[in-house]
Amino acid sequence: MPDMNADPALQRLLHHYHSMPPVAVMQLSIGGYDGQRLQLHAPLSVHVNDKGCAFGGSLASMMTLASWGLVTLQVEAAGLHADVYVADSQLRYLAPLFADLDVEAELAPDARWEDFVATLRNRGRARTSIVARARLPGGGNATEFTARYVAIAKP
């Protein structure tokens, strides 16, 4: 887990997550960030469904939040100020997850951060595609998520 005291951007992101009441109860933490991928973690105990596995809505929320956080971190790293929104998403549930929720988000293979940032600088609005996955403990994916996110520059 990254040292939250060493990275002010991650501190701000975690504070922002926890400032939203529905997210605060999720008990999520930042599991890692390497500048390209953002990982979030949450305990299964607060996301369990009636079958003893991860609740589908929690998985959807975690992947939405990880993707949103990744775009937000990229906007901030570029020195820009913008509101970030999810425009649309698609989710596939592949296998039940009987473990803590570990989600990773990254830029879609056909997208480039440089293009996204340049468009946001020049037009005040940009969109990009993100992919996220909830991993199974033994390997493979429990859930796959694809989405488009929009950033709109703040005046």
Image: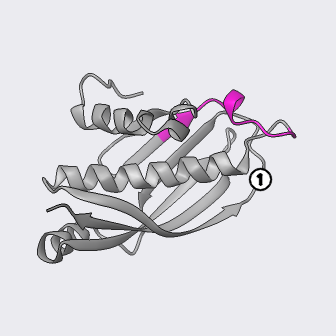
In the figure, 143 relative to 44: above or below?
below
Screen quadrant of the N terminus = top left
Horizontally, residue 135 falls left or right of residue 121, namely right
Within 10 Å of disc 1 (Cα), the crowding (few <14, some 14-19, many 20+) is some
Up/down of 50 relative to 83, above or below: above
Can the viewer see residue 140?
no
Which residue ends up furthest to the right in the rendered image?
A: 51
What segment carries the magenta color? 40-51
Image point 29% across, 58% down: which residue?
Answer: 83
Percent across and percent down for residue 96 are: 78, 48
Query: Residue 108: percent from the left, percent from the top?
Result: 43, 67
Q: How are the colours assigned in the image?
A: one colour
Q: Quadrant of residue 26?
A: top right
User: Residue 53 magenta-drawn?
Assistant: no
What x and y, as percent, mark residue 5?
27, 22
Instruction: Give the residue drawn at x 57%, y 40%.
Output: 102
Q: Say what secondary structure mark 1 lies in.
A: loop
- Tell me if residue 145 comes above or below residue 124 in the rendering: above
Tell me, yes or no, whether the highlighted magenta stretch contains residue 41.
yes
Q: Nearer the viewer, residue 37 or 120?
A: 120
x 77%, y 53%: residue: 95
Q: Quadrant of the C terminus?
A: bottom left
Identified by mark 1, the residue type is Ala
Callout count: 1
Query: Mark 1 = which residue?
Result: 95
Image quadrant in which you'd find residue 139: top right
